[in-house]
Image: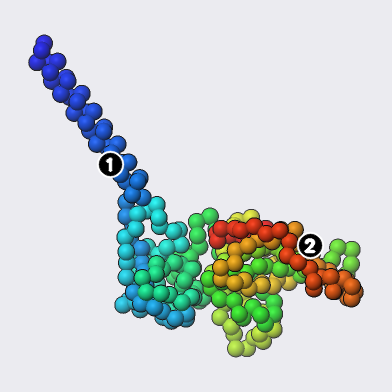
Amino acid sequence: MKARAAILSIVIASVGAFVVWMYLQRFEAEASGGPRVGVLMALRSVEPGSVLKEEDIGERWIPQAYVETRAIRSTDRARIVNLRTAAPLQAQQSLMWTDIIVQNDDKRAVSAVVQSGMRAVTIHTEGRAQSLVRPGDRVDVIATVQQPGSSEHRSGVVLLQNVLVLGRSADSPNTPASEGSDVVLSLTLQQSQLLAVANDKAKLTVALRAPDDVRIQEGIADVTSAAIAEPEKRAALAKAKSGPVRFDSPGGGKW
């Protein structure tokens, strides 16, 4: 009887020790950020538009909790070799999918640069200014629509703010710059619905932002062509100050 009790005590103690060990292992993993994940980095400084070569790319191991969703994993090394960069890279800088140029004729990386929960949507934009937009830029999307109750006047409506550009169609030498171009944007599914309707009913323009500007301006009123035709209203619009702003995460735009 005593031997059985002793064996049972040893078993219980062993199970308790194992449970404590498992708890300590889990606590240590959580405290350190979880298992390490391999991500890619630049081994040297790279200018915008440069082609990434195999020798330009290195890797580092980072705890999973600290890996950005935009970071390029080590397993994707072959997918970015010989692609062009959208922004300047510094030595030892982690590589992000938004650092890579995606053209419409390069299907390898388009799906990879779309962040989880977002969609890649192509819109046709108007005007020469669209040629300034590059992958990795952030823009506001403005629609020019027919003013309700008037066949003569139009309204300028801010549809989206702080939207990430994933790519731009290659310019055709036979297409005048004034006719605009196609731009690939990173949008939520609801934003995609909004632009699907706007693309059909309105002319779209994108306004380029500064690289680190993620502010969202609240309460922007529509601007009508009728107001532009009146000197006093036109002067008031030109002097209008920015409304209340908030700061958004870089994940998507305000709509």
Q: Is residue 47 left or right of residue 126?
A: left
Distance CA(mark 2)–CA(mark 1): 56 Å
Position of the C terminus by quadrant? bottom right
Vertical relation: 204 (above or below) 12: below
Crowd around label 1: few <14 · some 14–19 · many ≥20 (10 Å): few
Farthest left residue in view: 3
Q: Quadrant of residue 157?
A: bottom right
50 or 45: which is nearer to us? 45
Q: Is residue 132 left or right of residue 111?
A: right
Residue at (39% x, 69% y) in the render: 93
Farthest bottom residue in view: 173
Q: Is residue 231 left or right of residue 42?
A: right
Find out whether the residues at labels 2 and 1 contact each other: C-beta distance under 8 Å: no
Q: Secondary structure at mark 1?
A: helix
Crowd around label 2: few <14 · some 14–19 · many ≥20 (10 Å): few
**Label 1: which residue?**
25
Residue at (46% x, 72% y) in the render: 100
**Amino acid type of the residue tagged 2 in the rendering:** Ala
189 or 245: which is nearer to us? 245
Dot placed on the residue nearer the N-terminal end, 2 or 1:
1
